[in-house]
């Protein structure tokens, strides 16, 4: 079963996650979004921490991919904000 999966034959269905992508560079944001959507993921975007926190409540993503340096903080600030 594992060998079939590795050769591209999905032996079991995979549920794609909803991804929150946070990056202030529009080129990177667009490229990663395009790649993830092509792979079947649902993507919501944010360019800074303020909009990322607002998106969390409305979009309920499964996972976040966060650029380390953002205009209003960094990835560690984002994680700290999630803990509050």
Image: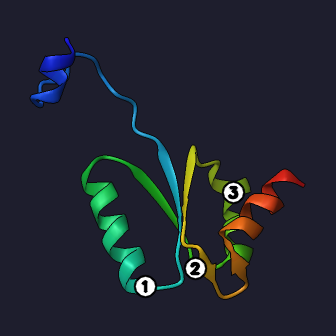
Category of crowding for the residue at label 2, using alpha-carbon neighbours closer than 10 angstroms: few (below 14), some (14–19), many (at least 20): some
Quadrant where the C terminus sits is: bottom right
Rendered location of residue 71, percent (x, y): 66, 88
SS under mark 1? helix
Counting residues from the start of the chain, the first of labels 1 and 2 encountered is 1
Q: Is residue 49 left or right of residue 69?
A: right
What's the residue at 76%, 69% (across, down)?
A: 77
SS under mark 3? helix
Q: Is residue 43 left or right of residue 27?
A: right
Residue 16 occupies quadrant: top left
SS under mark 2? loop
Write down the residue under mark 1: 26
What's the residue at 36%, 76% (across, down)?
A: 30
What's the residue at 13%, 19% (across, down)?
A: 4
Write down the residue under mark 2: 47
Rendered location of residue 57, percent (x, y): 73, 54
Tell which residue pokes out farthest to the top in this image: 1
What's the residue at 45%, 58% (across, down)?
A: 43
Write down the residue under mark 3: 56
Q: Is residue 55 left or right of residue 80?
A: left
Rendered location of residue 37, percent (x, y): 32, 56
């Amino acid at each position: 079963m594992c060998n079939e999966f590795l050769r591209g034959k999905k032996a079991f269905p995979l549920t794609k996650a909803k991804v929150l992508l946070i990056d202030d560079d529009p080129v990177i944001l667009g490229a990663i979004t395009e790649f993830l959507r092509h792979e079947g993921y649902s993507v919501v975007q944010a360019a800074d921490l303020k909009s990322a926190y607002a998106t969390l409540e409305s979009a309920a993503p499964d996972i976040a991919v966060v650029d380390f340096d953002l205009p209003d903080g960094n990835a560690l600030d984002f994680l700290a904000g999630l803990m509050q």
